[in-house]
Image (cartoon, grey):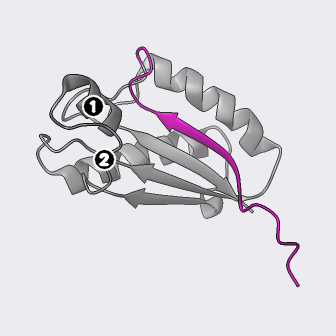
């Protein structure tokens, strides 16, 4: 029997908080994103739960599925290169199907150029 507890135990979003946004049509992890990754990396080292990385794109970006896949996999590669087992990590491309911001504004599009990381048990 399960304990009925919460399944999601941590979350981080890498997007347009300060310099933590992906540039348009880019999957390159920027300096601000590294700081966010370092913060969650410390949590990931202390548990053995599965990690789900969801990559997203804004509706104006070309090849949104490819781009969101590259964003998620670049974050996965960063975690693996820093010692997190790749068996724990599931990278998922959402394309532009799950917007969190308004694609009609620059701020909204920046929010949609994101990666979300969920840790589940």
Q: Is mark 2 on a helix, strand or loop?
A: loop
Q: In this view, does 3 lie to the left or right of 91?
A: right
Q: Is 106 one of the magenta-colored residues?
A: no
Q: Which residue lies furthest to the top in this view?
A: 18
- Asked if the residue under mark 1 is in contact with the one under mark 2, i.e. CB atoms within 8 Å, the reply is yes
Quadrant location of the N terminus in the rendered image: bottom right
x, y percent for residue 17: 44, 21
Q: Is 12 one of the magenta-colored residues?
A: yes
**Which sits in the foreground, 70 or 17?**
17
**Which sits in the foreground, 37 or 56?**
56
Q: Which disc number belongs to residue 99?
A: 2
Q: Residue at x 43, y 42 (%)?
A: 115
Q: In which quarter of the image is residue 81?
A: top right
Q: Which disc number belongs to residue 23?
A: none
Q: Residue at x 62, y 43 (%)?
A: 11
Q: Residue at x 30, y 49 (%)?
A: 68
For the record, the magenta segment spans 1-19
Circle 1 sits on which residue?
108
Q: Quadrant of residue 74?
A: top left
**Which sits in the foreground, 73 or 40?**
40
Q: In this view, does 2 lie to the left or right of 116?
A: right
């Amino acid at each position: 029997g399960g304990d009925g507890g919460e399944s999601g135990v941590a979350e981080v979003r890498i997007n347009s908080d300060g310099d933590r946004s992906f540039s348009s049509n880019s999957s390159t992890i920027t300096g601000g994103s590294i700081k966010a990754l370092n913060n969650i990396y410390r949590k990931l080292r202390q548990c053995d739960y599965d990690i789900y990385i969801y990559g997203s794109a804004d509706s104006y970006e070309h090849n949104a599925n490819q781009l969101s896949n590259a964003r998620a996999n670049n974050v996965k590669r960063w975690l693996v290169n820093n010692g997190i087992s790749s068996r724990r990590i599931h990278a998922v491309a959402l394309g532009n199907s799950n917007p969190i911001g308004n694609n009609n504004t620059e701020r909204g599009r920046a929010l949609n150029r994101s990666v979300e990381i969920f840790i589940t048990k």
